[in-house]
Image: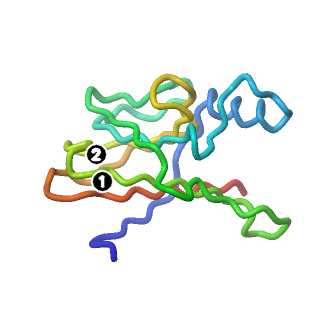
Amino acid sequence: MPFEVIEREGNALMYGGVSALWHRLTGGSAVAAFDATNARIGVGDGTAAADPLQTDLQGPNKVRKGMDAGYPQHTDSTGAAANTVTFRATFSTAEANFAWAEWGVFNGASGGRMLNRKVEALGTKTSAASWVFTVQLSLT
C-alpha cells in the first residue's frame, strides 16, 4: 500500500520523443521502442523550464530507472481507454536520493530519446524509503 499518492496533469512532449513515436508508428526500427527492454523513467533535480528541444533532464543529479516487471502497459482496443500507456519504475533506498524536481520518460539507460519532461517539486527522496514512480500518458 502506498504511503502517499500524488496525481498531476500536464507535461511537455519533446521533439525527439515525438519523432521516435512517429518513426516507430510508420514502421521504422532505427530508433529504440519505449518498451519493457528500453523504457526508463528518469528523475532529476533540475528546475529549468521544459523546452521541446531538450534531450535529457537538466539538473546535475539525475537517475534513469528501468521498468518494473509487466511495464510499460497498454491495452489495445478502439475504446476511449486505449489512449493511455503506463510506465512504472521503483527507485530503491540506494537510488536517486536527492530533491526530485523534474522527471521524464526515455527509451534508453543513457542517450536515446526523451519522450516527455515535467518540472515539478515531488519532494526529497532519502535512503529511508523506496519510491515507486508511475507515469500514465494519454493522447486526446
x and y percentages locating residue 111 in the rendered image: 49, 22
Taking 12 as reference, is 123 left or right?
left
**Could you tell me the amino acid type at mark 1?**
Leu
Labelled pair 2, 1 in contact (Cβ < 8 Å): yes
Q: Mark 1 points at which residue?
A: 122
According to the image, label 2 marks what residue? Answer: 100
Residue 45: horizontal and vertical position, in percent?
28, 37
Query: Which numbered marker is on residue 78?
Result: none
26 to 120, vertically: above or below: above
Seen in the picture, residue 16 relative to 128 is either above or below; the reply is above
Residue at the location (77% across, 69% down)? 80
Locate the N terminus by quadrant: bottom left
Residue at point 27%, 51% (across, down): 92
The foreground one among 73 and 82 is 73
Q: Is residue 105 left or right of residue 23?
A: left
Quarter of the image with the C terminus is: bottom right
Q: What element carries label 1?
A: strand
Q: Residue 82 lies in what quarter of the image?
A: bottom right
- Counting residues from the start of the chain, the first of labels 2 and 1 encountered is 2
x and y percent of residue 107 in the render?
56, 34
**Spatial distance from mark 2 to mark 1, Cα to Cα?**
5 Å
Amino acid type indicated by mark 2: Trp
Task: Please say if 113 is above or below 101.
Answer: above
